[in-house]
Each structure stands twice: as structure tokens, then as C-alpha cells.
Amino acid sequence: MERIASFNVDHRFINEGVYISRIDGDITTYDLRTRKPNTDCLMDNATMHSLEHLFATFVRNSEISKDVIYFGPMGCQTGFYLLIRNADDEVVLEIIKKILSDISEYNGEMPGNSEIECGNYKNLSVGLAKTEAKTYLEKIKNNTTEDLKYGTE
């Protein structure tokens, strides 16, 4: 069986950041790595779920909304994947930063916060999402498109 692309990246050398995980035709997969892999500092489910609801809502209402394919958490609890069609890396990186800033200052209701809209709606917290967004933004605020390649130590 062929190994999937994400298993070909040496996770011992991935740090927090934004990376291009892969490009498939006109779709770019961005790795929004909020945690260093294989450490004791993984995202808990409520934080991951909460940031997913807000980020997905904000990105699907951004200037690149028509090109958003998917935003969701990594099963390893160390970040998220953002899939964009016809991506302009500089634009996407700036939108990621803007959305994180907007979430860190958000004071509204949690989108999708009902039994009708979500399969685990009781496991959502605007406060957790705000804290995570602010922490992650601090880690990537100075990143440029030059930082989008996975680094090695």
C-alpha cells in the first residue's frame, strides 16, 4: 500500500507554523500547525472543535470563500488543514492571520451552536477558541510566504 503524503514528513522537525502540506492540481493544502507534534501539549477536543467552528465560518465568509474546499482539525490534535482552490499563498497567509485576529476579538455567539447544527454542540466555547486563536496568531504573526515550506532542524 502506498504511504500517504503526510506520513512522508518527519514530524520530529515540525514546529508551530503555517506550511504548504501538498498541492494537488489547483488545490493547495495548508497545514496550520498549532502544536509541535509528539509533545504533551496537544489540543483538547473542545478547543479544537471551537476553533474549527469559528475559523470555518470566518474563512467561508472571507474574500476567498468561493475557493475554500475544507477547513478541519488533524486527528493528531496538533493543528488544522485548510484546502484552497487557486491559492495565492500571500493572500491566504494574510487571511489566516486576519481570521485569527478576528476570532481573538470575537464576542458573538458560537456559529453552529445547536443540536440541529452540530453533532456535539455542547462541546463548544467561544472563550477557548479566542484563547487558541490569540496564542497561535502570536506564533505566526511574522511569518511570510518564505516560511510556508516545512523546515528541518
Image (tube, rainbow, N blue to C red):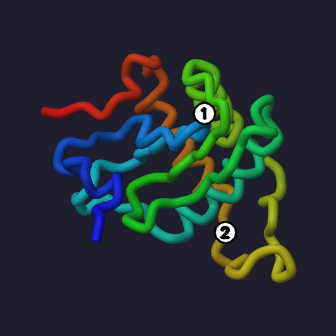
- Please provide percent x and percent y for residue 26: 61, 36
Lateral position of residue 44 relative to residue 37, left or right: right
**88, above or below 59, in the image:** above
Say which residue label 1 marks.
Answer: 96
Instruction: Answer yes or no: is residue 3 visible.
Output: yes
Residue 53 placement: quadrant? bottom right
Identify the amino acid type marked 1.
Answer: Ile
Amino acid type assigned to the residue bearing label 2 in the image: Leu
Q: Residue at x 48, y 24 (%)?
A: 141
- Of residues 129 and 71, which is closer to you in this image? 71
Q: Residues within 10 Å of mark 1 (few under 14, many from 20)?
A: many
- As drawn, 94 above or below 11: above
Residue at position x 35%, y 61% in the image: 42
Most foreground residue, 99 or 148: 148
Q: CA distance from mark 2 to mark 1?
A: 21 Å
**Badge 2 is on which residue?**
124
Above or below, 139 against 121 in this view is above
Say which residue appears at 25% left-offset and 31% top-offset.
Answer: 151
